[in-house]
């Protein structure tokens, strides 16, 4: 599988998992409140922001790996470490933003959005191992 194909599959899987989380939350609020209300919106906003953060971090990681693995590139290990820490700081900033603006962005939604990256990776890995098997 090429890197572009893998990236496309990961982005699609992240989107599908985000939609599944949001749909589950809508069903939960429908059952809990006995009708459709706007109570699911903070969760949806948080899940979308978390998923978009994952896509951004994945594209950023691809760029860092490409720079670090170029033949004529002399990249300091500190560059890689700083990029890693910046990705974590970006995640922390989103979580802090969700805590501060909890009426607009649900922290549970952000957590659901952030967890879509490992879920998508495991899903792609499972299906890729089944494709390689004769």
Image (tube, rainbow, N blue to C red):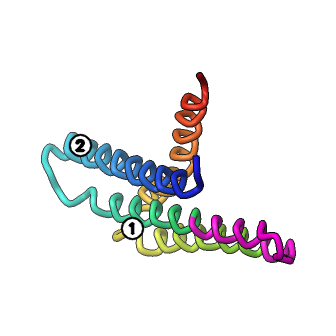
Instruction: Estimate the x, y position of residue 51 in percent, counting from the top left.
Output: 45, 60
Outermost residue to the left: 35
Q: Between 42 and 91, which is closer to the camera in this rendering?
A: 91
Mark 1 surroundings: few (<14), some (14-19) or many (≥20) residues within 10 A: many
Mark earlier in primary sequence (2, 1): 2
Instruction: Estimate the x, y position of residue 133 in percent, counting from the top left.
Output: 60, 25
- Residue bearing the label numbered 2: 32
Label 1 secondary element: loop
48 vs 71, left or right, is left
Dividing the picture into quadrants, the one containing residue 3 is bottom right
The residues bearing labels 2 and 1 have C-alpha atoms spaced at a distance of 20 Å
Dividing the picture into quadrants, the one containing residue 45 is bottom left
Q: Name the quadrant of the C terminus.
A: top right
Q: Nearer the viewer, mark 2 or mark 1?
A: 1
How many marks are shown on the rendered structure? 2
Label 2 secondary element: helix
Bounds of the magenta span? Answer: 59-81
Q: Between 93 and 119, which is closer to the camera in this rendering?
A: 119
Outermost residue to the top: 134
Instruction: State the residue at coordinates (34%, 70%).
Output: 104
Dividing the picture into quadrants, the one containing residue 48 is bottom left
For the residues bearing labels 2 and 1, Cβ distance under 8 angstroms? no
Mark 2 surroundings: few (<14), some (14-19) or many (≥20) residues within 10 A: few
Q: Main secondary structure of the magenta part?
A: helix
- Residue bearing the label numbered 1: 105
**Numbered mark located on residue 127 in the image:** none
Compared to 26, does 123 lie above or below?
Answer: above
- Answer whether residue 64 is magenta in the image: yes
- Answer whether residue 112 is magenta in the image: no
Instruction: State the residue at coordinates (53%, 67%).
Output: 95
Q: Between 16 and 6, which is closer to the camera in this rendering?
A: 6
């Amino acid at each position: 599988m090429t890197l572009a194909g893998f990236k496309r599959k990961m982005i699609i899987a992240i989107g599908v998992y985000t939609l599944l989380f949001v749909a589950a939350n809508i069903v939960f609020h429908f059952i809990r409140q006995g009708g459709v209300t706007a109570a699911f919106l903070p969760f949806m906003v948080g899940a979308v922001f978390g998923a978009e953060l994952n896509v951004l971090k994945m594209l950023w990681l691809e760029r860092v790996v490409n720079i670090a693995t170029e033949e004529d590139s002399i990249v300091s290990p500190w560059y890689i470490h700083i990029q890693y820490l910046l990705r974590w700081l970006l995640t922390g900033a989103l979580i802090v933003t969700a805590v501060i603006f909890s009426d607009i962005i649900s922290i549970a939604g952000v957590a659901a959005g952030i967890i879509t990256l490992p879920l998508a990776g495991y899903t792609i890995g499972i299906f890729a191992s089944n494709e390689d098997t004769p």
